[in-house]
Amino acid sequence: MANPLMVIENLHKKFDKMEVLKGVDLTINTSDVVSIIGSSGSGKTTLLRCVNLLEEFHEGRILIDGEEIGYTKKNDKRHRLSSSILAQHRALTGMVFQTFNLFPHLTALKNVTLGLRKVKRMKKEEAIETARHWLNRVGLLNWQDHHPGQLSGGQQQRVAIARAIAMNPKLMLFDEVTSALDPELVNEVLSVIKDLADDGMTMLLVTHEMHFAYDVSTTVIFMNEGKIGEQGPPSELFQNPKSQRLAEFIKNSTF
Amino acid sequence: MTVAISALAIALGTILGVFVGLALLYAWLPVRIIVRIYVDFIRGTPVFVLVLASFYILSIIGIQLNAFQAGVLAITLFCSTHVGEMVRGALAAIHRGQTEAAMAIGLTFRQIFLYVLMPQALRQILPTWVNAATEMVKASTLLSIIGVTELLLATQQIISRNFLSLEFYFLAGFIYFAIDFSIERLGRYVERKVAYS
Ligand SMILES: Nc1ncnc2c1ncn2[C@@H]1O[C@H](COP(=O)(O)OP(=O)(O)O)[C@@H](O)[C@H]1O
Ligand SMILES: [Mg+2]
């Protein structure tokens, strides 16, 4: 078996004194689609933010392709890496946020080319070509010259997906990317994600869309109070929950 | 002369102001406190007085500025504090998600500042900046029409001594108007150009 794409070992994260992640272990292989479900406040967002190095964490390691990200050990002491190396490590993963966070002063095209130009150091023509390829993939090639304010929520989120994936990350992170959308716009975004998953993109996603998680995932994780409560293929988790907690969570979710 | 003073001082003051704004927001705490005192002090002082101060205080320590230099210095300082406040406010108002999204694609802090935060902040402050620039022009017009040296004398007798002719006041009024009007027009034009919905 090939080496895992990402390994999370014994991840602990505190906000002040409150421990939000209490020892998370997780292995993701290439082309896995791992969905995280669980009630609000269980630490799902925090886990994703740790992987994208937007949060510091106090114990544990995250490895991508066998290399530790975010921290290094010097003389037995754990150090956060310098901000320029953190920036490089962040580019290994692509993050899509609940609130899109597109850059409002840039067109859809330029939202995508910014990282290609400044981080990937692509030539202008190559950046534009790459960006247009991905805008086309999310169905927005005709909207490339529009600013975010002129796009619907669903369109903005699709641009945000294009912006992240154009950077050619090893792993895509999606944090409840449809929960800020009007119901009629949810599907256009989910189908883009499904399309990328079918294409073999490795993903870790937090979702409240149980039907979607069931459909698209290779593995589903149930987060419970800062730990992985249960983990397995969707059919197993949804049809034979082992814990009372998960059974209740599933019963209270809408499919 | 007026235009030269204004343009130079506004340009210098704006550049300095960007750094003042950054310092107010991100600098090491003691530096931040010093800059804060600088800003509140200068902002609370009339430009008039700043010019006198440039003259007097600096000459005490042996630096004698000419009228042009004193005007540029005073207006630059004045402008830098106003722009600093604007930049600080505009940067602080940008949603945290902008920085995070930029970090997520691997941009460094410098790049985030240059390509994501600053362009948004500048668009935000443009209308206020135009107002402030208009004020600076008024101030410097006044300075160059009266002449800084006369101003020194005039402060003692500004009301009683009527040393300028009526035509001169008309001309001054007209120049004010013309310059302010052009700046406002230009500002509005640029604003329309860079506006986004
Ligand atoms: N920046 C923060 N500061 C303090 N506490 C936080 C912060 N972000 C999240 N938390 C807390 O951490 C816990 C987990 O939050 P989160 O990861 O957002 O959960 P989820 O995404 O599963 O709803 C919650 O109790 C939340 O209040
Ligand atoms: Mg969350």
Image (spheres, rainbow, N blue to C red):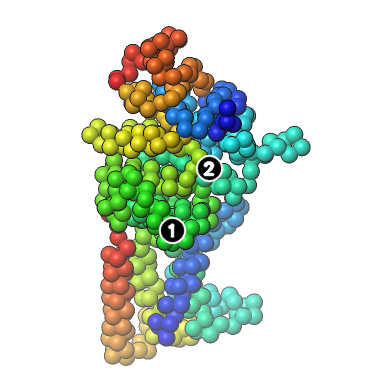
Distance CA(mark 1)–CA(mark 2) = 20 Å
Q: Where's the C terminus of chain A, which quadrant?
A: top left
Q: Earlier in the sequence, mark 1 or mark 2?
A: 2
Describe the element under mark 1 as helix, strand or loop.
Answer: helix
Q: Is residue B66 above or below residue A142?
A: below
Which one is nearer the viewer's eye here, A179 or A210? A210
| Residue B66 to residue A32: above or below | below
Q: Secondary structure at mark 2?
A: loop
Closer-to-camera residue (B22/A148): A148
Q: Which residue is mark 1?
A: A126
Residue B7 picture quarter: bottom left
Q: As displayed, is residue A179 above or below residue A23?
A: below
- Nearest the viewer among A41 and B53 is A41
Q: Residue at x 43, y 35 (%)?
A: A200
Compared across the picture, whether A32 is left or right of A58 comes to left
Which mark is drawn over residue A64?
A: none
For image coordinates 41% across by 26% down, the residue present is A217
- Judged by depth in the image, the label closer to the viewer, 1 or 2, is 1
Crowding at mark 1 (Cα within 10 Å: few <14, some 14-19, many 20+): some
